[in-house]
Image (spheres, rainbow, N blue to C red):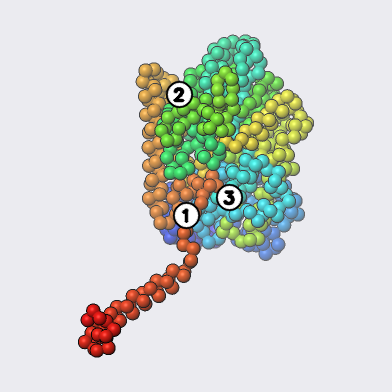
Amino acid sequence: MLSGELLIALVAAANVALLSAQNGISLSPANVGGLSSASVSGCCQCEDAITNEEAGVITIRVLSAGGETFRHIYEMIETGAREFEVEMDGRVSIVVEEVANLNQLADEIRNNAILDVAYFDGFVSNPGVVGSAVTRGGFMDLSEFVRESLDLDWLDILPAFRDSVLVYDGKPYMFPLDGDVHSLFYRRDVLEHFNLSVPRTWDEYVEVAKSTHGQTFNGTRLDGSCVGRAKHSVGQYYANLVLSSHSQALGTKSGFLFDVQDMTPLAGEALAETIRQLEEQNRYGSEDELETIGGGEDVSQNIKRFIADGACVLTYNWGDNFKRHLSSDSKVMSVVGVAPTPGSTKILDRSTGKLVPCTAEICPYGEDHPDIGRVNRAPYAAFGGWAAAVANNDSPLRQRSTSDFFAFVSSSRESRLGVIPNATGMLFNGQDPFRSSHLIVEEWMDQGYTQEGVESYLDTILTSLSSKNLALDIRFPQEDKIMDVLDAKIHDHLKRVRSNKIAEADRERERLAVANAISDEWESIIKNYDNDGRGVEPGILELYQKSLNIYKPPHDYNYIGNMRYYGWTIASIAVVLSLVMGIWVLKNRSNRIVRASQPIF
């Protein structure tokens, strides 16, 4: 005999398989694996949910990134869930489940979208999944809720997030839980000692790293730069950061990876120059840079070498470097400087694929410097920050309850402790500022941060996120494959350079070859997706334009609507009558009256 739980699970799995087949979606091993660990378990809670709702309690199921890598995100949502239940006096019960990687989470979101009734009421993910989810009808349009919710306080959210990162095709689909943008972190004391300036360009970044690498300062041997570049970590984000300053100059909506008019990859000399810059940075980094991860974890090269070891001069990263620099295990304490990430004096000419000097015309958002010329910066909202979305195929009551929960977690009062942690503590959940109310200097000082440091950090955050040339991640289907190609090929090239397997004289040619190989694979990924979804789903170009909020449907020049059908009908009748009358005249051409009226006969 099958148990009730097992029977429910089997029926759920069969329904997913049937719906997947009807919608042309294959259940890959990753999908099936995700279904067994999350969707099926969610379905097995349906009986409990029905029982609870009959008792006046609404049970909301949320699927979040988790596992060892994203444990802090899961715990943030779990903590918020318990506090929300208290806030609602037990009328709402929140069940938070987790999956260990983002690809599995994306599969779960897609599976959830094709069902008649959602397994999960909400999701916590990065905004990169929004294009794929909205295309399949998986996320609810939050426009009405945004207008009504006082707890969410939409206008308090920084414009970069409420106008771009959380929006798709002009509509908001996600709640912000975190605000991501890369910043430059540097040792103020080391730069002062060696009489060096904060780098304004990537060339200057390399010069500072070169000047300090291997030097001894206060008894410590220095690395000029420390950026974790292990494969399958976050190397693609660091590559995007450098590339964006060479390929995007006309504003956020012009894109930095693909041309917004025809999806031509913005690679060529821009990507080749990016690879050269990464080579030089790696040259003045630690020996194990290509084997250690980046990001905000304790073992990250960017954190460990810079803060715990105190042996690094420059790095770029998310906000973790600032929030951790006064922690009890820090060796850098109050000597950390923060600035916007460097830029470039050259920009990609998209018509030729060549790099050309920046001018006011082609780099309108650049800044002029008397000694080096015009510098183009493209601050990068890498990863986009964690965000939450509500299932579109849910009941209005459950959608409202899920929205209220996410608005609660996103609210200024609830998010404050995560965004502004105690400076000397050890509890960091990775949340960075995403609201104007997170930028109050006094609140950071109350948590133990110095005024000078806070003002530098918050000014950098605000300057970067206010830039009209802010670079956004791609947010359309296949973005994970596109980023995997970038990460793997650049990492493999850097490893060959580091081990001297590429002669110095051959490196320029190799860089361009790698850039072209990446471009070719990107084009292949896009072509395959468009061919597979032809006639069923919009093409990648349309989805890309929607992600940048610039899509305009093809113009219909028919201004008379269905009236044309009446016109065709009348014209057809006229033609038929003309033919009939012509034949009648021909047959009766001997008739005296006809002959009189038709002299030709």
Which residue is denoted by mark 3 in the rendering?
Answer: 170
- Nearer the observer, 141 or 501: 141
The secondary element bearing badge 2 is classed as helix
- Height in image: 583 above or below 148? below
Residue 539 position within the rendered picture, expressed as x and y whole percent measured from the top left: 44, 50
> In the rendered structure, which amino acid carries the disc numbered 1?
Pro
Which residue is at a point 63% across and 45% down the rendered structure image?
Answer: 162
> In the rendered structure, which amino acid carries the disc numbered 2?
Arg
Dot 1 or dot 2: first in sequence order is 2
Dot 3 or dot 2: first in sequence order is 3
Give the class, few, some or many, for how many residues have Cα within 10 Å of label 1's Cα (few <14, many ≥20): few
**Residue ranking furthest to the bottom:** 592
Which residue is denoted by mark 1 in the rendering?
Answer: 554
Which residue is at a point 45% across and 47% down the rendered structure image?
Answer: 540
- Nearer the observer, 459 or 296: 459
Residue 479 position within the rendered picture, expressed as x and y whole percent measured from the top left: 48, 42
Real-space Cα separation, disc 1 to disc 3, in angstroms = 17 Å
Q: Which mark is residue 514?
A: none
Would you say the residues marked 1 and 3 are in contact, meaning their CB atoms lie under 8 Å apart? no
> In the rendered structure, which amino acid carries the disc numbered 3?
Gly
Give the class, few, some or many, for how many residues have Cα within 10 Å of label 2's Cα (few <14, many ≥20): some
Residue 460 position within the rendered picture, expressed as x and y whole percent measured from the top left: 65, 30
Give the class, few, some or many, for how many residues have Cα within 10 Å of label 3's Cα (few <14, many ≥20): some
The secondary element bearing badge 1 is classed as loop
Q: Which mark is residue 276?
A: 2
Would you say the residues marked 1 and 2 are in contact, meaning their CB atoms lie under 8 Å apart? no
Which residue is at a point 41% across and 44% down the rendered structure image?
Answer: 526
- Height in image: 6 above or below 309? below
- Height in image: 441 above or below 262? above
Please state if 565 lies on the left or on the right of 125 as rendered: left
Camera sees residue 553: yes
